[in-house]
Amino acid sequence: MTSKIQYLQQPAVADFIQQLSSWLDGESFGEHQFKVRDKILPANYDRDFYATTLEEAYQRFYWNGQYFDESQALLDDFRNRLRESLQTGDAGQLLKVIDEVLLWGSGGKVIKLYTYNRDWAENNLASLVEKIRHSLAILQSEAPDTSPFDGELRMNAGFTKVYALAGDQIMMYDGRIGAAMGYLVRQFCESRRLLLPEALCFPWAPGASTMNRNPSTELLHFKQLANRSRFHADWKVRASWVASEALNNATAAWCQGPHALRRLEASLFMLGYEIPIARRKTQKQRPMMGI
């Protein structure tokens, strides 16, 4: 994949980062609404989700029985323990906290993805510290070679959260956050009458339910993650670069400080719950332009 400098200097990427910064600072990206269908929610949680700004979406965050501040306290604990175990080389402690992160990421449910990842970590215990360190070195590089994710290293919806907590400026890029990134790129392209730039084709993945997470339209087609580890790593890196640059340029109070990236993720997490299906164009439109 291209280097960080080469990627960020592409005109379409630079323009999208500028727009994302404006959205972080309170500009509306449009109206986004859906019915929250989760079975277990607090009695006072409004199931009618509605947001026009990223901050509004962030304020509605709720996951695994916790609002953002409670969830962040838990993530801070995970982060500290991950880093300590990597620093000391304690594979047993690393395995324990990875297991907790994977379970948290699954919503506290022992689902297939959780057991699949847990078993991989257990089976690779002897080299687990080395593998996580190697993964972080790649993900934090400004000229990453992601080829080790073809088989030696692991990337999926579970381990993306481990790396995000263990490293610096690494996004928790999974199918739901990818769907939200794609949705925002869709808003960006449609407002400018642009075809989808390849550099902004953030992949998504469906959830366990039938809710739509595909941001594609007739003219803008976003690919699926489809359990491709290296492909996932490539786009995780690109999304992290975009998010970090946009946050650096933003000035709004809600997205400042050490938890800024986690707050943006929380916003994207809520937007990605369900993506509005694009309306078919019935009238003749001006042709869209490429960049």
Image (cartoon, rainbow, N blue to C red):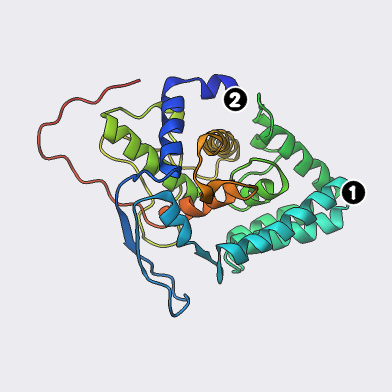
In the picture, which quadrant includes the N terminus? top right
Task: Characterize the local packing of mark 2: few (<14), some (14-19) or many (20 or more) Cα atoms within 10 angstroms.
Answer: some
Q: Which residue is mark 2?
A: 4
Residue 284, image quadrant = top left
Q: Is residue 235 left or right of residue 215?
A: right
Q: Amino acid at mark 2?
A: Lys
Q: Is residue 203 visible?
A: yes
Q: In this rendered view, identify the residue nearer to me: 155 or 152.
A: 155
Estimate the x, y position of residue 280 in percent, counting from the top left.
18, 43
Estimate the x, y position of residue 5 in percent, counting from the top left.
58, 21
Do labels 2 and 1 touch, CB within 8 Å? Answer: no
- Marks 2/1: CA distance? 30 Å
Residue 57, image quadrant = bottom left
Task: Characterize the local packing of mark 1: few (<14), some (14-19) or many (20 or more) Cα atoms within 10 angstroms.
Answer: few
Q: Is residue 68 left or right of residue 270?
A: right
Q: In this rendered view, identify the residue nearer to me: 118 or 99.
A: 99
- Name the residue at 52% across, 24% down: 8
- Total labels: the figure holds 2
Estimate the x, y position of residue 249 in percent, counting from the top left.
52, 34
The disc label shown at residue 259, or none: none
Q: Amino acid at mark 1?
A: Thr
Considering only order in the chain, which callout, 1 or 2, is on the residue closer to the N terminus?
Answer: 2
Q: Which residue is mark 1?
A: 88
Relative vertical location of residue 125 with respect to residue 250 in this rendering, above or below: below
- Name the residue at 83% across, 47% down: 86
